[in-house]
Amino acid sequence: MLDLKNPETLPVDAPVQIPRRPRRLRSSAALRESVAETHLRPANLIAPFFLKPGSGPAEPIGTLPGIARLSLDDFLREAERALNLGVRSLLLFGVLPEAHKDPLGLSAADPRGPVPGALRAARKAFGEAVVLYTDVCLCAHTSHGHCGVLKETPRGVRIDNDASLRGLAAMALVHAEAGADFVAPSDMMDGRVAYLRQALDQAGYSEVGILSYAVKYASAFYGPFREAAQSAPSFGDRASYQMDIRNRREALLEATLDEAEGADLLMVKPALAYLDILARLRPITHLPLVAYNVSGEYAMVKAAAQAGALEEARAVRETLTALKRAGADLIVSYHALEAVEKQWL
Ligand code: PBG
């Protein structure tokens, strides 16, 4: 009878045949480092920034600890910090006061807006050392908070897909003229990549690229962002344009269409609950893939670390590494600067 508490009874003399011992390659830190399969570098990270008009003090965002809405001067300081850390890709979001919003989101194409201003200033200050991406979407500019413009139909108020494309293209052109390297449409209207590509080319901006938020789900994890950008829809939700969380084939279709329409990079968003999507997309496209480690994902880690439930440094390293391992070439993350600065990677 085997008695685990009594070693005498264990068959210790039985010949042990273990043909493979994977633990050998884990036996020291030097060895583990030598066989590590995934490497995350600061150059793989894209740091998001929220830009507000005017010159007031930075406005911290309650649900995104460590992130604030910045004036131009504060942004330039943070951009310099990012470059010094080796994080050279920045993604810019504009935040507009309610008084600047209207049903068409016209302020999106205002060259005096905070994003065009930041593009011009960053380009002047940093030249080619920085890669500037801009979010292209109407939700922070429309009075109703939807990502497109509305129309009355016999079935009620709907998003006017094709009319929305005009506003998005106008916004993209203003960003291109102000010095963006890539415009990043996040609205999920059909055909917007082809439309933006054509608008950019016709205006002489063939060198300006498109990072498409190709696979963007209607997710609960955007909550803190909507506080940051003051862009929550005032009625209804985004389910008629963002993707249904239950779908996988649809993700492959969206990515395939955006590649065919001329996207230079494809994004999957959110990131953590969608690693299966990243992993499936990786072998079917030759374009770089971008994962967006969204605001809710960041807020969860921050809250858990604050509560003493986990070690933030290791949780962030594990999160960002997992995205790279699943197939992301680039990662948008609110953790980017802190993670590099504190050597969490
Ligand atoms: C704009 C946009 C959103 C995010 C990026 N661009 C919000 C939304 O779709 O409601 C979310 C980013 C995040 O949660 O960090 N459409």
Image (tube, grey):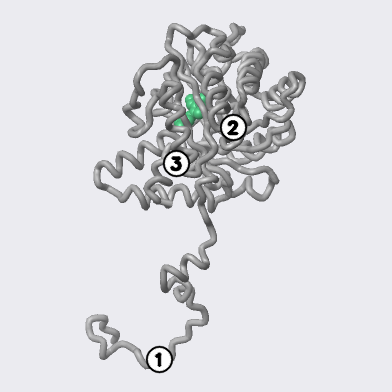
> Would you name the residue on which mark 1 appears?
14
> Would you name the residue on which mark 2 appears?
127
> Would you name the residue on which mark 3 appears?
336
Q: Quadrant of the N terminus?
A: bottom left
Q: Cβ–Cβ below 8 Å for labels 1 and 2? A: no
Q: Position of residue 304 (x, y in %)?
A: 30, 43
Q: In the rendered image of this protein, does residue 102 appear above or below residue 177?
A: above
Q: How far separated are the C-alphas under marks 2 and 3?
A: 21 Å
SS for callout 3: helix
Which is more N-terminal, label 2 or label 1? 1
| Residue at image location 52% in from the left, 82% down from the top | 19
Q: Position of residue 87 (x, y in %)?
A: 50, 41
Residue in the foreground of this view, choosing between 166 and 80: 80
SS for callout 2: helix
> Residue at the left extreme?
5
Left or right of 342? Residue 127 is right
Give the amino acid at mark 3. Ala
Q: Residues within 10 Å of mark 3 (few under 14, many from 20)?
A: many
| Residue at image location 45% in from the left, 74% down from the top | 23
Q: Position of residue 161 (x, y in %)?
A: 64, 17
Q: Residues within 10 Å of mark 2 (few under 14, many from 20)?
A: few
Q: Is residue 234 visible?
A: no
